[in-house]
Structure formats: C-alpha cells, structure tokens
Image (spheres, grey):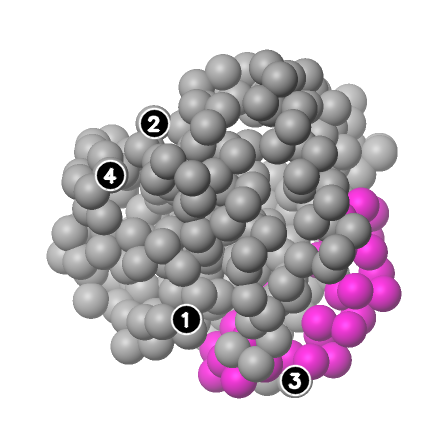
Amino acid sequence: MEFFATTGSLPIHISDSKKGEKTIILLHGYLETLYIFEEFSEALQNEGFRVIAIDLPGHGLTGSNPEINSIEFAADITTEVLKISGVEKAYVAGHSMGGYVAQQCLARHPETYEGIILLNSNPYADAPEKKADREREIELINNGKLLSLAALSIPKMYAAQNLRKFDDKIEETIEICEAHDPAGITACLRGMMQRTDNSETLSKAEKALLFFGNDDKFIPTQMADQIASLCTKAVVRRLAPCGHNSFIECQKECVAAITAFIKG
C-alpha cells in the first residue's frame, strides 16, 4: 500500500507491503522514484520479504528542503520512516544515490540496520570533476531543461546491449521525471556534492552485499575492483550484461543473491 507520513517537516511518499519476516527498505537513485522498484519489490515479496520504499527528499511526491537535501538528512528520514512503520530492524538497499543514503543510514543509525545492500553505488565523495558536472546540471535544470537532462541521462544507465530490451522502462522513468520539482532535484545535487566519504563505514560493515555491472558507465570496472578490495567482509556480485541498473537488468540474479545473503 502507498501512503504519506510527515517527518523532518516534509511529507514523505511511502510504499509498504506490510508482510514479511525480514524487512528491506529500498532507496532509489537520482531522477528516480519508488516506482522504479515495482517489479523488483514484487519479486522480493515473493521471496517472503516485507518491502518498504520511499521517494527520497526532492524526488517524486516527497517534499524538499529549499536549498539542500543532504545525504545525512535523507538517512534520518529513512530511519524515521521505519519507526513510523513499526520496524525495529531492517536491511537497507540503495541504488546509486540511494546507496549514498544507505551508507549514512548505517553510519548514523547502526542499531536499526541488520545489513546494507548497494546496487551500483560507491562510498566515495564527489571528485572535483564530478562536482563540476553537477554544477552544470544545476544550471541546466534552472534553465528549464530537467526533462531534456533526463532523456539524455537515463538511457546511459543501461548496458548498450540492454537498451532495446528495457526501452519501455526507460521511457517510463523519463516520463515520471515530470513529477519532480526542479528545485528539489537541484537541492539533491547540492547534497550529493557535499557528501562525505563513506569508505570507513562500508569497509567495516559486518554484513554488506555489493552489486556491480560489467558495462556500468558510472562505476567502471577499475572502481568496482577498488571498492571490492576495500570491503573485504562484503559479498560482491558482478553481473553481465549489466549497466548501472542491476536490479532491473539482472533482476533474477539480484533477488537470488539478496535472498541468499539475508536468509543464508
């Protein structure tokens, strides 16, 4: 079921399957909403998990702070949603930007999270060139180019050989971007620019599952190798053919790995 709750002075859009012995909270990536997880969530529910998903601050139907939606703020909101939902312990799974939030969930509220699942994400702070890219995106969005930006960016999140296969999902994701408040998106970009390095948090995580794609344009193989070397306690899954959207492009493999990770 879908509903709204107010926390952190913002209305938060929430989806909650309500049933399941173990709970997974799903955190979407940049320019996405909780609807990106529809098929993935259903598959996880079929494995017996309770699945909660939210629109992160600045995205979809959730409210936004006026200037910046920090990663730390989003992590606190996520944890508060679990409390509102009556969940004492959960696994947090984050895609890309959602992975940054997931790592801060673990850092700030370790008592709440049984483990972390990163779907094509990394623990690093923005490099100067990445910050410059985000500044350019802010300028484009401020000039009314959000949908044009989405139409260019979202297809790049898929492996080249998967573009035709997932054409409908790509179009759907772009169309849903019409629901975003442009000011909310720019506030999220500022939050990502200011985020801290999470390498220590992730490397010390007692239970972590990391997914990487062989054709991920945002996390190349060299970076994936570096993260895997850093996280010696983590379970690492490398998927192919797969870009930046492992939970869509390789859904069955992801669900099987998550089920084994949590239930095994």
- Please name the residue that numbered disc 3 is placed on: 232
Determine if residue 139 is in view. Answer: yes
Q: Amino acid at mark 2?
A: Leu
Q: Amino acid at mark 4?
A: Leu
Label 2 vs label 3: CA separation?
38 Å
Where residue 105 sits in the image (x, y, percent)?
A: 39, 65
| Among the two numbered marks 1 and 4 on one chain, the one whose residue lies closer to the N terminus | 4
Disc sitting over residue 61 in the figure: 2
Front in this rendered view, residue 180 or 138:
138
Q: Amino acid at mark 3?
A: Thr
- Please name the residue that numbered disc 1 is placed on: 106
| Among the two numbered marks 1 and 3 on one chain, the one whose residue lies closer to the N terminus | 1
Please tell me how crowded label 3 is: few (under 14), some (14-19), or many (20+) other residues with Cα within 10 Å: some
Front in this rendered view, residue 53 or 58:
58
Q: How many marks?
A: 4
Classify residue 35 by image quadrant: top left
Label 1 vs label 4: CA separation?
22 Å
Specify start and end residues of the magenta stretch as a single range. 202-231
| Among the two numbered marks 2 and 3 on one chain, the one whose residue lies closer to the N terminus | 2
Please tell me how crowded label 4 is: few (under 14), some (14-19), or many (20+) other residues with Cα within 10 Å: some
Q: Is residue 229 magenta?
A: yes
* SS of the residue under disc 4: strand
* SS of the residue under disc 3: loop
Label 2 vs label 4: CA separation?
10 Å
Q: Is residue 147 above or below residue 51?
A: above
Front tag of 1 and 3: 1
